[in-house]
Amino acid sequence: MRYDFNADDVFEMAEQMERNGAKFYKEAAESIDNQDARAMLLKFADMEIEHEKTFSDLRKNLTTDEKTPTVFDPNGESVLYLRALADTRVFFEKTIDFSTLESILKAAIEAEKDSIVFYLGMKEAVPDKMGKARLDDIIKEEMGHIRLLSRELVALR
C-alpha cells in the first residue's frame, strides 16, 4: 500500500528534524571544553531553531491542496507516525562520538547528508498538486548546513 504525503506532512517532519538538530548541537556544545568550539556549536543550534521557524513559516503559506490529508485519519495517528519517523531518521539513529570537535562536525555533516537523502525520497512520495516543489526549499536549507559545517571542518585541519 502506497502512502502519499503532502507538503504539510513533510514540513511537519522538517520542523521536528530541526528541533532534533538543535538538541544535538546543544548536547555537543556541553561536551566540549573549548569555549570557541562551544560557541560555534551553540550558533549551529540557533541556526537549527531559525530553520525550524523558516519551515514553520513556509508551512503556514501552503495552499489548501498542499495541506489536504492524503488518508482518512480521524484519530490523528499520522502525525504521531511522522514525528516518530523524523525522530529516528536523522541525528538520533546513530551513536555519536562527542569526544572531539572534528568527530562532532563529521557526525553533523553525515546527519545533514542523511536528511537530504530523506527529503529527496520524501519528494517522490509527495504528489505535484500537494506541494512537491516546496520540498526544494527544505533541501536547499540542508545543503547550506553542509557548506557551513564543511568550512568549519576544513578550518580545523
Image (cartoon, rainbow, N blue to C red):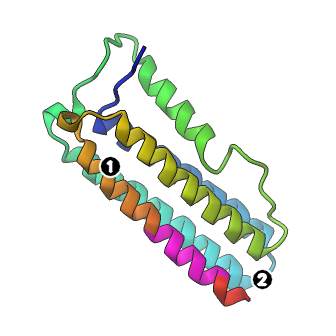
Q: Is residue 112 left or right of residue 155?
A: left
Q: Count the labels in the image.
A: 2
> Would residue 83 appear left or right of 62 to someone viewing this image?
right
Q: Which mark is residue 145?
A: none
Q: Nearer the viewer, residue 150 or 99?
A: 150
Q: Is residue 75 above or below residue 99?
A: above
Under mark 2, the amino acid is: Asn
Q: What residue lies at 56% left-to-right and 31% top-to-bottom?
A: 84
Q: Residues within 10 Å of mark 2 (few under 14, many from 20)?
A: few
**Which secondary structure is most common in the magenta stretch?**
helix
Q: Nearer the viewer, mark 2 or mark 1?
A: 1
Q: Secondary structure at mark 1?
A: helix
Q: Is residue 36 above or below residue 53?
A: below
Q: Please tell me which residue lies in front, 21 or 89.
A: 89
In the rendered image, residue 108 lying in the magenta stretch gets the answer: no
> Residue 82 vs residue 40: left or right?
left
Residue under the point 72% across and 67% down? 104
Viewer-proximal residue among 120 and 69: 120
- The span shown in magenta is 144-153
Where does label 2 land, which residue?
34
Q: Which residue shows up at 41% across the image and 60% down it?
A: 51
Q: Residues within 10 Å of mark 1 (few under 14, many from 20)?
A: some
The picture places residue 15, in percent across and down from the top left corner, at 43, 47
Residue that mark 1 sits on? 135
The quarter of the displayed image where residue 28 is located: bottom right
Do the CB atoms of the residues marked 2 and 1 lie less than 8 Å apart? no
